[in-house]
Image (cartoon, coloured by chain):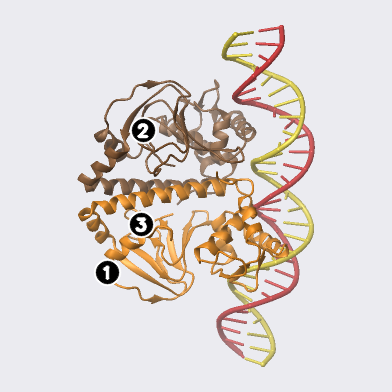
Chain colours: A orange, B brown, C red, D yellow
DNA sequence: CGTCCTCTTGATGGCAATCAACGTTTGTGG
DNA sequence: CCACAAACGTTGATTGCCATCAAGAGGACG
């Protein structure tokens, strides 16, 4: 994924320590970089939401990840970025030159250790994601996705409005299902009173417990 | 996956540089470690094939990876191993204490950089795997799996006998399909003259080109 | 020879993709 | 302000792939 999650404070601190300037505001749909561009910078999301997309030769897309404030984008791509990245909302990023990161690592080896642990955690989460994508039903994927969005934006109780800045196609291409299946299952969740869909662009969890049951059923990791 | 592929010579050299002793021969079905055990060692596979398995609370298994000679098992698990690992064949491994690795990294920071790049490559391959598991049909998965086995054992041309040390259930649990589906598609490959199945325990690629087409169709990465 | 295990083959059903149509919102230009 | 188009979202009908259920074939081994 190359996007370190909020749960990784080391990455955040590390990048902050070596950052050169504060971010300036950029508009929605701004493209951070394309696949194939020189991977010369790291970006920490300060505000807004970004989308990392990989396009295949047959035209299909895989939305690799959505990046929220605190996430770091661009680590570990090698010489060239391996996916496209653009902003879904107006946003701010903090940029770090890749060379600065390598220099810092040379002078402070313990940072290297931390980053390796981070990378290991990232591999672990990717592993979980593979299992999820491989084994879960459409409903389980959607329930899990909504829960992860709520958790990432700090809305961990019932009846809180959660922003849903990505369109159905983005969700579908992220979860490996079709937009119709996303729509049908969202409707089903609404009908059952588990979530509310007041507007396009947001949702409200009405029954956190049942949503969690849907996300976990059949494939809970022990 | 936590299993570095053959294509990562740095990992191999790195572990060799810090290894304490050569491996001794162990038998098939020997258990290297269980999920939850203290992750105090790295293992480089010298000979034989290992299987990394994760068991879920509902009894289902995910075969995380198969490890071939040159692969390194146990990197990045944190304090405890996150899956079970056992030998499918008689095997030899080379063991490195985890502490030795950290010490070496402190004294030689450039190793840390290499390991980070390795981890990044691992994340990249996990990403590809996710897409594969998420998007590919059963036939595409099986074709891709057979090709990867052939490539990993250096059999990259037609009519070479490739060892298939894992049973159908292992293949099924690795690819996220059922043993019946594995069997049906293997039979179909044989019927079409694309592979031969002379014995249980091996296969022969008869038409590499068509097998590659099957593996890539519909979702080739550009 | 019988038991166990792996693998294969057949029949059926369910879930999600696909194809298709319609409703809703947003944006644009007359 | 309205007319229209384009994008997004929802809903319905049908199809196809694969899981599931079931049974049989082929070895391995006592």
Chain of the residue where label 2 is placed in the rendered structure: B
Q: Nearer the viewer, residue B79 or C19?
A: B79
Cβ atoms at labels 3 and 1 below 8 Å apart: no
Task: Say yes or no: labels 3 and 2 on the same chain.
Answer: no
Q: Secondary structure at mark 1?
A: loop
Q: Is residue A137 above or below residue B97?
A: below
Q: Percent position (x, y) of residue B187? A: 61, 29
Please state which of the two labelled residues, at mark 3 or mark 2, is closer to the viewer: 2
Cβ atoms at labels 1 and 2 below 8 Å apart: no
For mark 2, does the 10 Å Cα neighbourhood hold few (<14), some (14 to 19), or many (20 or more) residues? many
Task: Say yes or no: labels 3 and 1 on the same chain.
Answer: yes
For mark 1, does the 10 Å Cα neighbourhood hold few (<14), some (14 to 19), or many (20 or more) residues? few
Q: Percent position (x, y) of residue B164? A: 50, 27
For mark 3, does the 10 Å Cα neighbourhood hold few (<14), some (14 to 19), or many (20 or more) residues? many
| Image quadrant occupied by the N terminus of chain B | top left
Question: What residue is disc 3 on?
Answer: A75
Kindly identify which numbered label has been placed on residue A20: 1
Q: Is residue A147 above or below residue D20?
A: below
Kindly identify which numbered label has been placed on residue A134: none
Q: Secondary structure at mark 3?
A: loop
Question: Residue at the spot x=28%, y=27% of the render?
Answer: B21
Chain of the residue where label 3 is placed in the rendered structure: A
Separation of marks 3 and 2 at Cα, in angstroms: 27 Å
Considering only order in the chain, which callout, 1 or 3, is on the residue closer to the N terminus? 1
Separation of marks 3 and 1 at Cα, in angstroms: 17 Å
Question: What residue is disc 2 on?
Answer: B43
Looking at the image, residue B161 sits to the left or right of residue A43; the answer is: right
Cβ atoms at labels 3 and 2 below 8 Å apart: no
Looking at the image, residue A15 sits to the left or right of residue B35; the answer is: left
């Amino acid at each position: 994924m190359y996007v370190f999650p909020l749960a990784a404070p080391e990455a955040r601190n590390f990048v902050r320590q070596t950052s050169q300037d504060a971010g300036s505001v950029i508009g929605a749909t701004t493209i951070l970089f394309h696949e194939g561009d020189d991977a010369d910078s790291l970006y920490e999301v300060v505000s807004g939401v970004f989308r990392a997309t990989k396009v295949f030769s047959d035209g299909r897309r895989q939305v690799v990840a959505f990046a929220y404030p605190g996430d770091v984008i661009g680590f570990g791509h090698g010489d060239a970025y391996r996916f496209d990245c653009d902003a879904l909302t107006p946003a701010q990023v903090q940029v770090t030159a890749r060379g600065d990161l390598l220099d810092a690592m040379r002078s402070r080896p313990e940072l290297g250790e931390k980053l390796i642990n981070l990378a290991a955690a990232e591999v672990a989460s990717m592993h979980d994601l593979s299992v999820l994508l491989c084994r879960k039903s459409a409903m389980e994927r959607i329930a899990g996705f909504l829960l992860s969005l709520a958790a990432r934006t700090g809305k961990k109780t019932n009846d809180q409005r959660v922003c849903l800045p990505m369109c159905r196609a983005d969700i579908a291409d992220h979860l490996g299902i079709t937009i119709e299946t996303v729509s049908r299952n969202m409707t089903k969740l609404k009908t059952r009173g588990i979530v509310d869909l007041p507007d396009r662009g947001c949702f409200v969890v009405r029954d956190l417990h049942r949503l969690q049951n849907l996300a976990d059923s059949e494939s809970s990791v022990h």
